[in-house]
Image: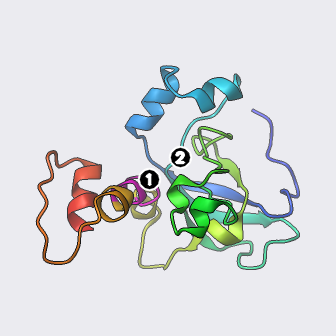
Amino acid sequence: VPAPPSPPPPDAVTLRVMATGVCRSDWHGWRGHDSDVIAHGLPFVPGHECSGVVVEVGSDVANFGPGDRVAVPFILSCGMCRECDRGKSTVCERQEQPGFTRWGSFAQFVVLPRADRNLTMLPDSVSFVEAAALGCRFTTAYRAVVQRGELKRGQTVAVFGAGGLGLSCIMI
């Protein structure tokens, strides 16, 4: 596995991965069910649920620096497309996805573009393991419950299945 570029691209950070999750989406990628992974080809590093410590920043990154603890979303949105303008960055038309459209977090280091738009500072009170769980299942649950389901305060919903995604739906 080649080392990450140094320095990273102008809008990116290089992250030392401190925690990463394994998700059913990873299984779909391994089995060849995901067109992004197929298009990328081999060699490839999966993993899309991660958190870590910034070790290097690109020249245009303003909000993060070496040593910052961050949480990473599954979808690295562009902020400029129609869906991002509508507040629906989870379906960004030009999204990047660690572990699908680019090398992922099953590596020691991962390069993440669009850092200022997508990364979130991680408070010391939140562990890397807890943060790694947020990037995929919570964004998926949010889209399902709030954006697609349009659930409002006082309404009732039934959630079938109490795995990571189901529990996230209940919390939202």
Q: Residue at x 62, y 61 (%)?
A: 82
Q: Quadrant of the C terminus?
A: bottom left
Query: SS for tag 1?
Result: loop
- Above or below, 14 against 41 in this view is below
Numbered range of the magenta stretch? 134-141
The kind of residue tagged 1 is Cys
Q: Quadrant of residue 143?
A: bottom left
- Callout 1–callout 2 Cβ contact below 8 Å: yes
- Above or below, 110 against 82 in this view is above
> Which residue corresponds to mark 2?
48
Query: SS for tag 2?
Result: loop
Using the image as rendered, state which of residue 85 and residue 13 is in the foreground. 85
- Above or below, 160 against 35 in this view is below
The kind of residue tagged 2 is His
In the rendering, which numbered label is found on residue 81? none
Q: Is residue 65 magenta?
A: no
Q: Residue at x 47, y 34 (%)?
A: 26
Residue 84: x and y, percent? 59, 64
Q: Quadrant of residue 147?
A: bottom left
